[in-house]
Amino acid sequence: MSNDCIFCKIISGDFGTEFVYENEYCVAFNDINPKAPVHILVVPKVHVASLNELEDKNLMGELLMAVKETAKKAGLSAYRVQINTGKEAGQEVFHLHLHILGNKKGNI
Ligand code: AMP
Ligand code: ZN
């Protein structure tokens, strides 16, 4: 938990954000500024600033399995997964997260 991290605050329920999926490792919620008809973020409960700071291999496995479960729950049969890493690559929130980008037709 990082006190000045917006995703840590979301995870602790400070903003009343609805989780579309949750397990012991992560939560998933809709992106506030969607770049696709379906745009969901899968976010680990532990604060890791970016992929560059990740040391727990098992956690990434759990996150990818959570992506699969979240996509299924959202009715997506096809989707893209994106991890922006570093400011120059477009990372705005420095708490590791996986973007799920898809549409209801499943052909993105
Ligand atoms: P990135 O550019 O990879 O760091 O992605 C950060 C994403 O978080 C962006 O797509 C933002 O729209 C999204 N975002 C920022 N604040 C919130 C929030 N309070 N709730 C949901 N999504 C957010
Ligand atoms: Zn955080």
Image (spheres, rainbow, N blue to C red):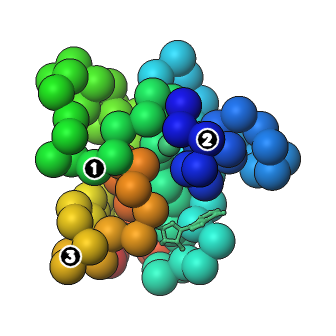
Q: Is residue 46 above or below residue 99?
A: above
> Which residue is farthest right?
16
Contact between labelled residues 3 and 1, with CB atoms less than 8 Å apart: no
Quadrant, the N terminus: top right
**Residue 91 vs residue 64, the one in the foreground:** 91
Q: Nearer the viewer, mark 2 or mark 3?
A: 2
**How packed is label 1: few (under 14 Cα within 10 Å), some, or many (20 or more)?**
some
Position of residue 8 in the picture relative to residue 103 (left or right): right
Q: Can residue 78 be seen at all in this image of the molecule?
A: no
- Quarter occupied by residue 64: top left
What kind of element bears circle 2? loop
Q: Whole-Å distance between the Cαs marked 1 and 2? A: 16 Å
Task: Estimate the x, y position of residue 25 in percent, counting from the top left.
Answer: 46, 23
Instruction: Work out how far the residue at label 1 is from the one at label 3, CA to CA, in angstroms.
Output: 12 Å
Mark 1 or mark 2, earlier in chain: 2
Q: Is residue 65 left or right of residue 22?
A: left
Report the mark closest to the observer, 1 or 2.
2
Q: Which of disc 3 and disc 2 is earlier in sequence?
A: 2
Specify whether 87 is left or right of 33. left
Q: Which residue is mark 1?
A: 50
Callout 1 touching callout 2 (CB < 8 Å)? no
- Look at mark 3 in the image and give the residue it sits on: 89
Alpha carbon of mark 2 to alpha carbon of mark 3: how far? 24 Å
Residue on which the image places disc 2: 3
Q: Quick check: can you spot residue 17?
A: yes
Residue at 44% across, 62% down: 93
Mark 2 C-beta to ligand 2 under 8 Å: no
Residue ID at (52%, 17%):
24
- Of residues 20 and 49, which is closer to you in this image? 49
Q: Residues within 10 Å of mark 2 (few under 14, many from 20)?
A: few
